[in-house]
């Protein structure tokens, strides 16, 4: 289906600017949701860790703003707290952030409105790619007209980002270092929340198989090939799940 | 430090992703494969965060973390796939379990 088909389906065709502003506002409204709240709580867990290892408010906010991927932020916090050098720290962070690449590759075709979407627009909104916004986008964007998707995603991602930055600053300043069970619970929030939201975002049996295989292969490869474990998990788990799904669903055609 | 080891090391993957997506269409098989790879990669991170955590979560015994996750899955399924109940169950088991033990 081409982008012009989508416009016909949509019926009334607002001017590009008006339509964009409208969908941006819809995205802002869409950001008032449970995942945003959970992400705020998960960042509270990070501020607690950050003040424990002595990061300043500016450092905490810069990491949240520039990186915007909690697992990688935690990796960098760990590296800074033990005084790792710049290059080893960058490598550790880059390895933990590899997932952002296939996530972005999977999001862009959903986000793009044919040739009309400018690359620099996509480069800017790609900053919002992190599990929360990605899961939300992969679930909700396909039901929107193509022209609406990028402004909607920009509104959603920008609002979640802003709200979480504010709540992170507030919690760093106001909350004492939480300790013990509560702190453990806040750290646990990220993986548990990722797990359920990834499951909800799984559109096909192949995606669900990929999720399960990743959970199993991750620890196995962590022991066998430390360092390359996440990449291997993604490629092996994803490829096996995809191939299995392809054979299961299209046996007749192949 | 934050700009190089933080910003560049994360943001470059997103930019590479934008260009790697090229003209990929969201109804193609390559797209389905990339989505499966992304899903498996994030699943690998989830497993690592639960099984090999840094810091305070690492003080919680492994079996309690796994019981908490199992409890979360049960809560999620019993509530007919409600995200919040899955998370709450896992958190209650983890925090409650560790508070009782320590």
Image: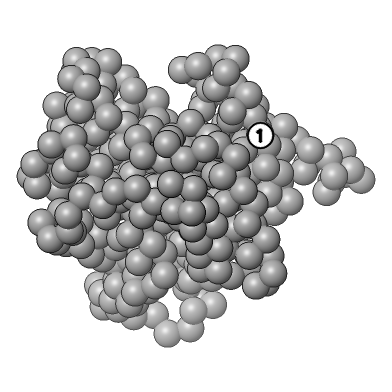
Q: Residue at x 42, y 36 (%)?
A: B59
Between A235 and A104, the residue placed more toward the observer is A235
Q: Quadrant of residue B4?
A: top left
Residue A126 spot, x, y in % from top left:
33, 47
Residue A243 spot, x, y in % from top left:
75, 35
Q: Is residue A205 left or right of residue A89?
A: right
Q: Quadrant of residue A214?
A: top right
Residue A244 visible in the snapshot? yes
Q: Residue at x 50, y 16 (%)?
A: A226
Between B49 and A175, the residue placed more toward the observer is A175
Q: Which residue is denoted by mark 1 in the rendering?
A: A216
Name the secondary structure under disc 1: helix
Residue A56 spot, x, y in % from top left:
8, 41
Q: Residue at x 34, y 26 (%)?
A: A94
Output the chain of dot 1.
A
Q: Is residue B46 left or right of residue A165?
A: right
Crowding near the residue tagged with mark 1, few <14, some 14–19, many ≥20 C-alpha atoms within 10 Å: some
Q: Is residue A146 left or right of residue A67?
A: right
Count of labels in the image: 1
Residue B28 spot, x, y in % from top left:
63, 46
Q: Is residue A140 left or right of residue A219?
A: left
């Amino acid at each position: 289906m081409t982008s012009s088909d989508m416009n016909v389906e949509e019926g009334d065709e607002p001017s590009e600017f008006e339509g964009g502003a409208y969908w941006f506002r819809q995205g802002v409204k869409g950001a008032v949701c449970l995942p945003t709240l959970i992400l705020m709580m998960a960042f509270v867990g990070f501020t607690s860790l950050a003040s424990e290892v002595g990061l300043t408010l500016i450092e905490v906010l810069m990491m949240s703003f520039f990186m915007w991927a909690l697992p990688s932020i935690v990796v960098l916090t760990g590296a800074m707290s033990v005084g790792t050098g710049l290059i080893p720290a960058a490598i550790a962070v880059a390895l933990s952030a590899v997932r952002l690449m296939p996530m972005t590759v999977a999001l862009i075709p959903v986000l793009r409105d044919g040739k009309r979407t400018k690359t620099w627009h996509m480069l800017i909104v790609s900053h919002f790619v992190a599990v929360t916004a990605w899961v939300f986008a992969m679930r909700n964007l396909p039901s929107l007209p193509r022209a609406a998707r990028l402004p909607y995603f920009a509104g959603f991602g920008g609002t979640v980002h802003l709200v979480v930055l504010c709540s992170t600053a507030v919690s760093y300043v106001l909350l004492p270092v939480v300790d013990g069970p509560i702190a453990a619970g806040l750290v646990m929030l990220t993986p548990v929340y990722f797990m359920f939201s990834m499951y909800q975002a799984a559109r096909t049996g192949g995606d669900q198989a990929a999720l399960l295989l990743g959970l199993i292969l991750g620890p196995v490869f962590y022991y066998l090939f430390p360092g390359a474990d996440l990449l291997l998990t993604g490629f092996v788990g994803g490829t096996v799940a995809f191939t299995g799904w392809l054979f299961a669903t299209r046996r007749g055609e192949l | 430090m934050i700009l190089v080891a933080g910003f560049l090391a994360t943001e470059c993957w997103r930019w590479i992703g934008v260009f790697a997506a090229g003209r990929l269409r969201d109804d193609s098989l390559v797209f389905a494969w990339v989505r499966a790879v992304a899903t498996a990669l994030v699943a690998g991170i989830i497993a690592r965060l639960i099984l090999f955590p840094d810091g305070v979560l690492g003080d919680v015994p492994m079996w309690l973390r796994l019981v908490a996750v199992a409890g979360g899955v049960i809560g999620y399924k019993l509530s007919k796939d409600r995200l919040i109940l899955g998370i709450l169950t896992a958190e209650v088991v983890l925090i409650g379990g560790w508070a009782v033990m320590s």
